Image (cartoon, rainbow, N blue to C red):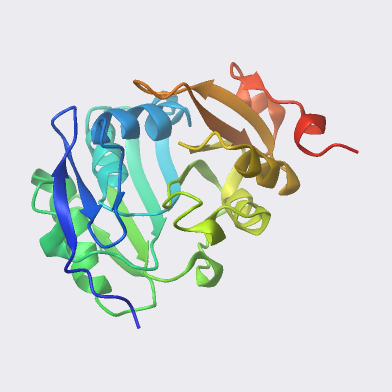
Amino acid sequence: MKKPLSQIVPFETADGSYTLFDEARGVHYRSHHGAVTESRHVFLGATGLLERAGEWIVAELGFGAAVNFTQTVRAFRERPYVERLTYHTVDWRPVTPDHLPFHDGEPGDLARQALELAGEATAPVRVSSQDAAIDLILYPTPWENADLQVDDAQAFFHDPFARNVNPEAWTAETFRWARAALRDDGRLATYSAATPVRRAMFEAGLHVATAPGPGRKREITVAAPTAEALDPFELLPRQKYLPT
């Protein structure tokens, strides 16, 4: 049974945007230095999603406070050359609609609709925008049980809680699962720059690169099925993390 969510409260971050704070575990759902700043830089920016035209297909681990989703919707609506957005997201312990009063407009409405349908469900739930240009598919289940039914995502947002809170989301097995959702020129991005995380990515068969982080954060990590997909980032040497 899923744990109660009564101790999860809104938290205003340094850039004026909101995330959630889990008082019981003492963890923020997004950087307290700037929720939107981090989301735009790490996930929309480093994956190269904003440079794509046609259709955006996104996969995500960690729906959380829906900051990545709402920012992706806003970016999508700002780009008339992008015709569709399909957003697959996995969260084994999704919050309730009442936890997200701070997301306004269409993005917030879609996020809350999906969370309302999720409830105690384990099967995927789907909501669509009124013009049918946006599909949000939420998988309220552990990633091990989530069959994403997608292998052509341009972007994978790897955004679970940190390794000390959620270690099972940072294994080689997790990254193999994520890799299967990506097209050859797709990218995975995460806020973590930890050595064990990068080692797990290499073990999963990904190419790995370092990228500048947002604000005070020095660096983040980007990975992809092919080295070419990581241009112009600085590729990391596999032998440093998986010595022979």
Q: Is residue 233 above or below residue 67?
A: above
User: For this rendering, which residue is in front, 119 or 192?
Assistant: 192
Quadrant for the C terminus in the image: top right
Residue depicted at 27% across the width and 72% down the height: 118
Residue depicted at 34% across the width and 44% down the height: 85
Quarter of the view holding residue 238: top right
Quadrant for the N terminus in the image: bottom left
Residue farthest along the bottom direction in this orientation: 1
156 relative position to 177: left or right: left
Quarter of the view holding residue 120: bottom left
Q: Position of residue 143 (x, y in %)?
A: 50, 65
Q: Is residue 70 above or below residue 168?
A: above
Q: Is residue 94 above or below residue 205?
A: below
Q: Position of residue 209 (x, y in %)?
A: 62, 27
User: For this rendering, which residue is in front, 67 or 135?
Assistant: 67
166 relative position to 210: left or right: left
